[in-house]
Each structure stands twice: as structure tokens, then as C-alpha cells.
Image (tube, rainbow, N blue to C red):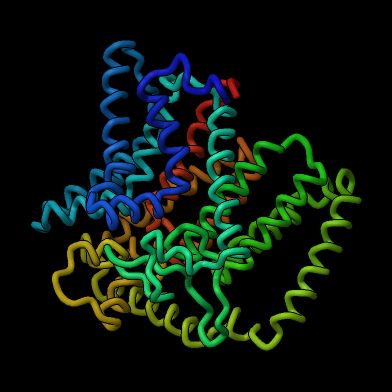
Amino acid sequence: MKNIFKNTNLFTLLTQFLVITLPFYVILKLSFEVQLGLNWFGFMIKEFVLILLILTIIYEFIKSKKKPKLKLIDYLILAYIWYGIVITFYNHLSIWALVAWWRYDFMFLIIFLIFKNWTIFLKTKFSSLVKLFLLSASISLFLWLVVKFLIKEEILQYFWYSIYVADWQFKGWVPIYHWVEASWLRRFQWLLDSPNAMWFFLIIYWWIVGHFFRKKLEYHVILIYLFLIILIVLTYSRSALLGALIAIISIIILNLKTIITKYKKAIIITSLVLTLLTSLFYIVLQDKINNIFVREGSTTGHFERMEVGINRFLDHPFGQWLATSGPWFRAVETRVIDMPLEKFYIPESWFIQQLVEWWFIYFSLFMTIFFLIALEIYKKSKPIFWAFIAILTMNALLHTFEATYLSMLLFLFLWILYSWENKNTL
């Protein structure tokens, strides 16, 4: 670790900067923007660094004259971006709407293109970046565990989080915690801006740990997995639990023979521990189980929004264009955003919003891109593949990629892995 910043270049330093700072993005953004009045600090951490990465690539390319070998998935992503830009200008939408759209919809795909095709300019090892991330993320996670279980979340009000719990506002307050309605249960949020973002981060953390220890399934690794499962449960995110459950069941089914022959003892112990933890969870929270997992009002609201989105697509099958669906509508909407407006614009599904805005062509490009990504990941790393499936499952029910600082982190690691696995230089 002590030599990690030596013999490097700007491209590598910027990559290391993202790996270190993105786990702390929300609290850094609040500290600098709310306390110091630097309203563009969040932009400086993510978008400005991304622009610098692109400029350094141009510089390194001119210096080395190394051309990337583009493949089908590269061309599909470029077509996806090009189609959205052309349609945006065709419909006379504002430049600001275009800026808001690229930040949410394909900034993480630009990260993909950068680190899939230009990892040759990185003067560090993938394993070093993994260690750097695990160190940064583990420190931030430890700090939050201290806050959560020893100090309590109220201390976050002194770090410019809002005391108005479960009251997230666009470009406004980040609550000190969210709760489960009618149960007064504090959902595990960490230093992020929502429990769902916390789950997204935990899955990234989980698969990096899984890839790091992929060749040895020792008991301390199993304990880390169990601990992360407990934290995921404490987010009380049903879509998160569903994604994790689908991934875990798929892993067991497709690797049943290997599990039985190689890890029989470990599986028995793990199953017993999970049974014990599940029983304790039920005993302690049995009167709140319905509110935690059913939440009739919330569940009904989710499906109502998805139904509205599907009906909007059926009414306008050729698309309604940019900022007419999804989280970025808030960035360009001039009216007061109330609940009826939220329900109309937010379909609670990243997939449905593709249909509403950009017609079937855009949706087909999106699905093809992610199918090819999943296919490549499956060949490279099973832990990362199943984590990716869990994230996609959650995106079918929520706008998970709305947390751009986490989607950038995911695709940064995803495609550095892809490139270096191809060169066997891990």
C-alpha cells in the first residue's frame, strides 16, 4: 500500500481518487456544499474527474498512438448514446436537460468505455485498486457501525444531514435515517442518502470481497459474508432482498454439485447460523414483520407507478423523450413537484423508464448492452456476475442507477476486471 501512488500518471491518480472518495461521496458533498457553500463540489468529485479522465486518455493516446480495438458492445453503447442525443435535439429539448440525462442515464457507460478500452494507461495493478477500495470502504463502514450502534444517527445532524427523517429532497436535505413505516425501525443507511443506496454499495463491496477471496473459502470469509447479509437485511429493502435472494438461489442451483462435494461442512455451518439468525430476527421483530416485508401502502404505490409508466408507453409507443420519465425529470421540471407529479414521472423501474422515454429501439439497445455485459462477466468472475444479477433485479423495481456515485464505482471495477482478466495481469 505504501508504494501505491509511486511511479504513476494522472490517469492512474484520478482512478485512485475515485476509488478512495466515492464511498464517502455523500458526506463529502454535504460538508463542502452545505457548510462551505461550494455548490459544485459534488460535480467536482464525479463529473469533473470523469472529464479529466477523458482528457488524459486523449493525451496518452496521442503520446502512445495505441488504438483500442472496439467490439460489438462498444458500438452498441455508442449507438445508445448517439440515439439519445439526436432525439434530444430533434425534439428541441434544453441543453440542461441533456446534461441531466447523461449524468443519470449513461455516465456509468462512459466509465465502461474508458476502463474497458484504456486500462493500458493505468500504472497499477487491479489487486492494488481492490485493496485501496477495501481499505477506504471498510473505514467508512466501520465509522458508520460506530454511529449506528454506539452513538446513534442523531450525531449526523452536526455533519449537515437533516433531522427530518425519511424526508429526502432533490438538491435538498439528506435525512439522518429512513424508517420502516408504522414500525419506528431505523433502516440501515450508512453515510449514504438512502437504504437502497446502502444496499447497492454493500453488493459492490460483497462482490469485491468475493472476487478477492475467490480461490479460498475460509471461515473468516464466510463470517464476512454473513455480516454483510445481516447489514443488507437491516436496510429493510424488499427489492434488495429479492435481488440478493434470486442471486443466492441461482448460485446454489447452478453450483449444487460443487457445493455438496467441496464445501459440505461450510454450508452446514452457514445454514445453521442463518437459521439461528432468522429465528432471532423473527422472535425480536415478529410484530413488525408485516410492516417490514409487506408494507401494503408502499407496495401498492410501487405497482401503481409501474402501471402508469407502462400505460404511458402504450399511449405513446414511439417515446416521450428526455426527462419525461425517471429521476432526472426533477432537474428540468419547473413546476412544484408534488406526489401526483412524482407518481406520473417516476415509474419505479429503470427498465420501464427506458420504454417511456425512448421507444422500443432505445430499450432494446439497453437490454442488449446489459445482456452482453452479464455474459462477459459470467466468463470472468462468478461472484461479480451474481452480484450484477442482483443489481439488475433491483433496477427492475427501483431506479438503483440513480445513485450515480455508486454506478460509477460499479462499472469502474467491472471493466478494469474485464480488461485485465483478458490480459492475465491481475
Residue drawn at 48 percent across, 57 percent down: 191
Q: Nearer the viewer, residue 374 or 325?
A: 325
In the image, farthest residue toward the left: 92
| Position of the N terminus by quadrant | top right
Please, which residue is most extreme toward the top here?
Answer: 64
**Which residue occupies 26% across, 27% down?**
55
Instruction: Name the side, left or right, on which 50 lies relative to 187.
Output: left
Question: Percent x, y for residue 260?
Answer: 87, 50
Q: Nearer the viewer, residue 111 or 355?
A: 111
Please give left or right for residue 311 compared with residue 123 in the image. Answer: left
Q: Position of residue 59 (x, y in %)?
A: 27, 18
Task: Answer above or below: position of 336 versus 113.
Answer: below
| Residue 166 horizontal side relative to residue 258, left or right | left
Q: Position of residue 395 (x, y in %)?
A: 46, 61
Q: Quadrant of residue 267?
A: bottom right
The image quadrant where one finds the C terminus is: top right
- Residue 250's place in the image compared with 300, above or below, is above
Quadrant of the rendered structure where residue 118 is?
Answer: top left
Above or below residue 9? Residue 32 is below
Residue shown at 60% from the left, 58% from the top: 145
